[in-house]
Amino acid sequence: QVQLVESGGGMVEPGGSLTLSCAATGTIQGVFVMAWYRGAPGVPRELIATISSGGTPKYEDFAKARFTISKDNVDKTSYLRITNLTPEDTAVYFCNIRKLIPVIDYWGQGTQVTVSS
């Protein structure tokens, strides 16, 4: 059984930075893509970035300047580095692994990021 556990969230002052981690346990066979999303109450979860099995990152337009996604293939851990945080970045951040063929989505429980002075 695959489980994802996020960590690294918390309260940060505007302009600060943090790195979120997502540790995956269990076996994922085949090709998969790792991703990070964020969401807030009443707001649909939005995609931030993905990273392929081969390590190719792809970012949504809003994330290109301040977000960096990376991963460690050995222990199936993904990371999301966020710099120059603003209050608008306040959200619950979720990691995702999408196994391809067939498509199966795995989600973490989310980690809260609050940006406030």
Image (tube, rainbow, N blue to C red):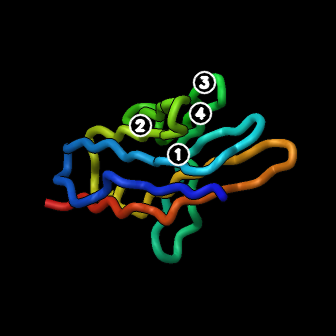
The kind of residue tagged 3 is Thr
Query: Tag 4's secondary structure?
Result: strand
Q: Where residue 47 sits in the image (x, y, percent)? A: 58, 50
The answer to which quarter of the image holds residue 65 is top left
Distance between the alpha carbons at the discs numbered 3 and 2? 14 Å
The kind of residue tagged 2 is Phe
Distance between the alpha carbons at the discs numbered 2 and 1? 8 Å
The kind of residue tagged 4 is Ile
Compare marks 3 and 1 and give the one earlier in the sequence.
1
Q: Where residue 95 sits in the image (x, y, percent)? A: 53, 52
Residue beneath disc 2? 67
Q: Are marks 2 and 4 in contact (CB under 8 Å)?
A: no
Q: Are marks 2 and 1 in contact (CB under 8 Å)?
A: yes
Q: Nearer the viewer, residue 15 or 8?
A: 8
Picture quarter with the N terminus: bottom right
Residue beneath disc 1? 48
Q: Are marks 4 and 3 in contact (CB under 8 Å)?
A: yes
Locate residue 18 relative to residue 45 in the image: left or right: left
Query: Label 2: few (<14), some or many (≥20) within 10 Å?
Result: some
Residue beneath disc 3? 56
Distance between the alpha carbons at the discs numbered 4 and 3? 5 Å
* Residue at 26 percent of width and 59 percent of height: 10
Distance between the alpha carbons at the discs numbered 3 and 1? 14 Å
The answer to which quarter of the image holds residue 83 is top left
Query: Tag 1's secondary structure?
Result: strand
Residue beneath disc 4? 51
Query: Tag 3's secondary structure?
Result: loop
